[in-house]
Image (cartoon, grey):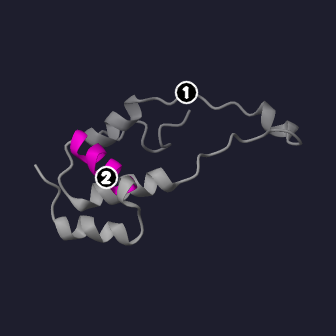
């Protein structure tokens, strides 16, 4: 199935190379996308710089911070409309 509308895909060449667009279209087709928007998003993601690790040097107080493991059941509560845990956002 071709990406629709083709004119929208071709407009992406205004800011992207042919090879980058080709790779993005191939990726979009592999994941079952059939519109120009996913191709645009794939191109944008390819252009983003990777995120560097956050260095804790000079921030000894942050080394003491501990984050609790996410309770996945809280997300299911949101989907089912069950307010259990929603008042605190699922935080303990």
Side of 24 where 86 appears, left or right: right
Q: In the figure, 90 relative to 24: above or below?
A: above
Q: Nearer the viewer, residue 74 or 57?
A: 57
Q: Residues within 10 Å of mark 1 (few under 14, many from 20)?
A: few
> Which label sits in the foreground, 2 or 1?
2
Nearer-N-terminus badge (2/1): 2
Confirm or deny contact between disc 2 and disc 1 (CB under 8 A).
no
Determine which residue is flagged by label 1: 69
Q: In the figure, 36 relative to 25: above or below?
A: below
Name the residue rendered at 42%, 42% in the picture: 86
Side of 60 where 24 appears, left or right: left
Q: In the figure, 19 relative to 81: above or below?
A: below
Q: Quadrant of residue 41?
A: bottom left
Q: Is residue 39 visible?
A: yes
Determine which residue is flagged by label 2: 22
Residue range (magenta) = 20-30
Name the main secondary structure of what is drawn in magenta: helix
Q: Residues within 10 Å of mark 2 (few under 14, many from 20)?
A: some
Q: In the figure, 20 relative to 88: above or below?
A: below
Name the residue rendered at 19%, 43% in the picture: 32
């Amino acid at each position: 199935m071709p990406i629709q509308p083709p004119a929208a895909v071709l407009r992406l060449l205004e800011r992207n190379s042919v090879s980058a667009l080709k790779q993005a279209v191939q990726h979009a087709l592999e994941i079952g996308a059939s519109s120009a928007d996913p191709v645009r998003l794939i191109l944008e993601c390819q252009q983003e710089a990777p995120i560097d690790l956050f260095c804790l040097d000079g921030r000894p107080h942050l080394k003491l911070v501990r984050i609790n493991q996410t309770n996945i059941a809280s997300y299911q509560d949101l989907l089912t409309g069950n307010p259990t845990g929603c008042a605190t956002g699922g935080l303990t």
